[in-house]
Image: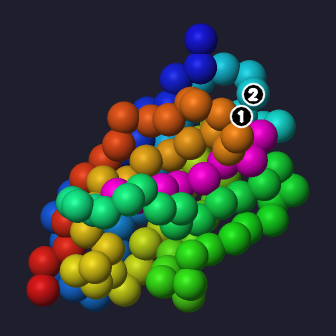
Amino acid sequence: QVQLVESGGGLVQAGGSLRLSCVVSGSIFSINAMGWYRQAPGKLRELVASISSGPWTNYADSVKGRFTISRDNAKNTLYLQMNSLIPEDTAVYYCRISGTDFWGQGTQVTVSS
């Protein structure tokens, strides 16, 4: 059974950094594209960054130059390095195996001004 478990969220001041991790159980990790999404209160869930098995990457305009998505196939782990955080980045962050209904449980990121 496939499971995704995120970690690394927390409370940080504006300008700070956090690194999110998503550990994926199951052997499908290395052959699938993966993505990080976020959902702020009262807003729709949005794609933040994605990475193929290539690995090619893609970012939302709002995080370009500040966030970096990466993966370690040997560890079945997806990462999101978030730098220069701003209050607008406050949300619950989720990882997902692209094109599937496999999602993590989410990790809260709160950026104070």
On-image quarter of the N terminus: top right
Q: Residue at x 37, y 86 (%)?
A: 84
Q: Where are the magenta residues, as a range?
A: 32-39
Q: Residue at x 65, y 34 (%)?
A: 100
Among the 4 quarters of the image, the one containing residue 42: bottom left
State yes or no: residue 101 in magenta. Answer: no
Q: Secondary structure at mark 2?
A: loop
Does residue 74 appear in the picture of this structure? no
**Please, what is the dominant secondary structure of the magenta stretch?**
strand
State yes or no: residue 38 in magenta. Answer: yes
Q: Is residue 13 left or right of residue 104?
A: left
Q: Amino acid at mark 1?
A: Phe
Q: Which residue position is annotated with label 2?
A: 28
Q: Secondary structure at mark 1?
A: helix
Q: Picture coordinates of residue 69 (x, y %)? A: 60, 64
Q: Is residue 7 left or right of residue 33?
A: left
Tag shown at residue 29 = 1
Label 2 to label 1, Cα distance in Å? 4 Å
- Check contact, mark 2 vs mark 1: CB within 8 A: yes
